[in-house]
């Protein structure tokens, strides 16, 4: 295969040899017995017989180099793996900052041309390079802002016969500390890329949340792989967001990191995450959600709620005259411990699920959120509220029995099925009030409802239509539980002294969202 450099042709000739393979097969007819003669020549013409010229593909490089990144590009270009050609490249581009803080650019593409010399300098080659860097079918870009103001842009692009990478540093120079922080993101960046290019895709994003915001102020990842899937991820000290869209549906999550005073301990957050992930599984089962899409949702939710850092003791209110509210251990013990968030997963609606009844669609939509607020005239007179909500709306078709195949067509004989419609809601609202520095009220109100409608059709005729609602509500006096613990302690100290000096019972598990009304009713 011929290798050509667009930007350094002389070096290319000294380092890389242009290989031309020629072969000629001919048969010469004898005078006594005439037979047809055929000549196949590559690179030369030696007879008047028909000649067929085959030109091997040309590798056109942007720059001649033997560095690690160029070697990986060369290896990936010939790979058949379905990873966009980006295997190991993301990590290599960030690890490069351990040795250099400057710009970098490299690209290569295969070109079949009768004129290999012209290919090295042609406008078409330069245009192809630009296309790979900016508008290739598969694109990944990582943009990182440093606390000092410098901007680092890393881009990768690929298609069937080309691959390009680029590093640009602008708006300042990188310090050694910043370069080291960039290099630490190498594994997380590569894992995110590898997850996106697997089948089915995965959202491995936690590695991109593991950075010191005093050194790197923000990280943004954008990726698209043809029209099949897109991803947008952002993380800074105040927020984390992700939106992923693919053939199966859309995942969107926003985590508010600005209210650090409401964050709990690591064990408290782990407890809340475990509960939420269980409820996500329950929602997926209740609504017959796409398993791979739900896995992406759970992975993204876990990633954006990981590596949150330490909790703060004060929270600044908004407004022209802000108030600094102080939260103590008692307050945090009655909250979930998680940062506020909004999250949703929406499955691509199948409008052709039942050709005979277009109004019956297969759909899945799930939203869940948490919002917290701290109000009042001062820390001594503060009010803390935290509300969690979830809503599932889904519809889907099932066969009449598990061992039967569902194949709905316009033929009435195929119309044997169950059609489910699910509508579930749940809420948990915690309220904590202080007056003149004393805890005067703390309670949580919880509710959950499920509605399941099942329509049974046999030979296209409706046999039954049933709706089953289940509801439950619960109120828990958190202040009363604290007072009971104080009374059982029998230490003789005041209630307020007990709250500030003793290890308090864990009440955070009592405020967590519960979407199953049956379990909510049974909880003590």
Image (cartoon, grey):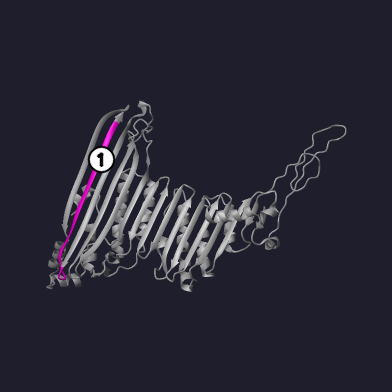
Q: Quadrant of the C terminus?
A: bottom left
- Closer to us: 521 or 357: 357
Q: Residue 35: give x, y in percent of width and height.
A: 81, 33
Q: Quadrant of residue 341?
A: bottom left
Q: Residue 351: give x, y in percent of width and height.
A: 37, 37
State whether residue 500 appears in this view. Answer: yes
Q: Return the residue at label 1.
A: 452
Residue 436 lies within the magenta run: yes
State whether residue 204 appears in this view. Answer: no
Residue 10 lies within the magenta run: no
Drawn side of residue 110 relative to residue 284, left or right: right
Drawn side of residue 375 relative to residue 162, left or right: left
Range drawn in magenta: 435-456
Q: Residue 337: give x, y in percent of width and height.
A: 28, 62
User: As displayed, is residue 115 above or below residue 181?
Assistant: above
Q: Magenta stretch mostly in which secondary structure?
A: strand
Task: Assign a secondary structure to mark 1.
Answer: strand
Q: Quadrant of residue 371?
A: bottom left
Q: Quadrant of residue 9?
A: bottom right
Q: Residue at x 23, y 59 (%)?
A: 386
Q: Residue 350: give x, y in percent of width and height.
A: 38, 39
User: As displayed, is residue 364 above or below residue 121?
Assistant: above
Q: Residue at x 47, y 47 (%)?
A: 227
Drawn side of residue 94 relative to residue 412, left or right: right
Q: Residue at x 49, y 56 (%)?
A: 140
- Closer to us: 144 or 272: 144
- Closer to us: 519 or 463: 463
Query: Which residue is outermost to the right?
Result: 31
Q: Residues within 10 Å of mark 1 (few under 14, many from 20)?
A: some
Number of labelled discs? 1
Query: Which residue is outermost to the front?
Result: 320
Drawn side of residue 300 relative to residue 7, left or right: left
């Amino acid at each position: 295969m011929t290798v050509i450099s667009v930007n350094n042709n002389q070096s290319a000739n000294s380092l890389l040899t242009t290989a031309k393979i020629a072969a000629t097969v001919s048969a010469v007819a004898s005078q006594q017995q005439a037979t047809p003669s055929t000549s196949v020549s590559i690179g030369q013409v030696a007879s008047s017989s028909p000649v067929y010229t085959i030109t091997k593909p040309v590798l056109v490089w942007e720059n001649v180099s033997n560095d690690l990144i160029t070697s990986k590009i060369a290896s990936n270009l010939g790979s058949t793996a379905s990873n966009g050609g980006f295997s190991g490249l993301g990590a290599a581009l960030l690890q490069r900052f351990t040795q250099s803080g400057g710009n970098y650019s490299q690209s290569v593409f295969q070109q079949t041309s009768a004129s290999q010399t012209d290919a090295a300098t042609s406008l078409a080659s330069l245009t192809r390079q630009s296309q790979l860097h900016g508008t290739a079918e598969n694109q990944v870009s990582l943009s990182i802002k440093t606390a000092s103001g410098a901007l680092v842009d890393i881009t990768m692009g690929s298609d069937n016969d080309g691959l390009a990478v680029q590093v640009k540093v602008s708006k300042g120079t990188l310090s050694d500390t910043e370069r080291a922080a960039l290099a630490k993101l190498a594994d997380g960046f590569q894992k995110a890329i590898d997850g996106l290019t697997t089948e089915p895709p995965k959202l491995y994003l936690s590695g991109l949340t593991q950075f010191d915001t005093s050194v790197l102020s923000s990280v943004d990842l954008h990726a698209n792989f043809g029209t099949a899937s897109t991803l947008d991820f952002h993380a800074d000290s105040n927020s984390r967001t992700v939106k992923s869209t693919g053939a199966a549906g859309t995942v969107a999550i926003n985590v508010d990191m600005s209210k650090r005073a409401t964050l709990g301990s690591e064990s408290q957050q782990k407890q809340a995450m475990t509960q939420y992930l269980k409820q996500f599984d329950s929602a997926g089962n209740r609504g017959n959600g796409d398993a791979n899409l739900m896995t992406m949702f759970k992975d993204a939710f876990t990633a954006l709620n990981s590596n949150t850092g330490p909790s703060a003791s004060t929270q600044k209110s908004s407004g022209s005259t802000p108030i600094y509210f102080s939260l103590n251990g008692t307050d945090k013990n009655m909250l979930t411990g998680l940062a506020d968030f909004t999250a949703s997963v929406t499955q691509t609606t199948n409008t052709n699920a039942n050709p005979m009844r277009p109004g019956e669609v297969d759909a899945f939509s799930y939203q869940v959120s948490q919002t917290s607020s701290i109000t009042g005239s001062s820390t001594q007179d503060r009010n803390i509220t935290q509300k969690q909500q979830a809503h599932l709306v889904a519809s889907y078709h099932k066969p009449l029995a598990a061992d039967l195949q569902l194949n709905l067509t316009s033929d009435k004989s195929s119309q044997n099925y169950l059609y489910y419609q699910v509508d579930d809601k749940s809420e948990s609202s915690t309220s904590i009030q202080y007056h003149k520095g004393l805890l005067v009220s703390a309670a949580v109100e919880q509710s959950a409802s499920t509605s399941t409608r099942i329509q049974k059709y046999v030979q296209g005729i409706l046999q039954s239509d049933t709706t089953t609602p289940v509801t439950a509500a619960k109120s828990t006096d958190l202040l009363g539980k604290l007072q009971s613990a104080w009374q059982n302690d029998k230490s003789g100290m005041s209630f307020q002294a007990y709250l500030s000096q003793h290890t308090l019972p864990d009440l955070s598990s009592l405020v967590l969202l519960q979407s199953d009304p049956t379990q909510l009713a049974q909880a003590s």
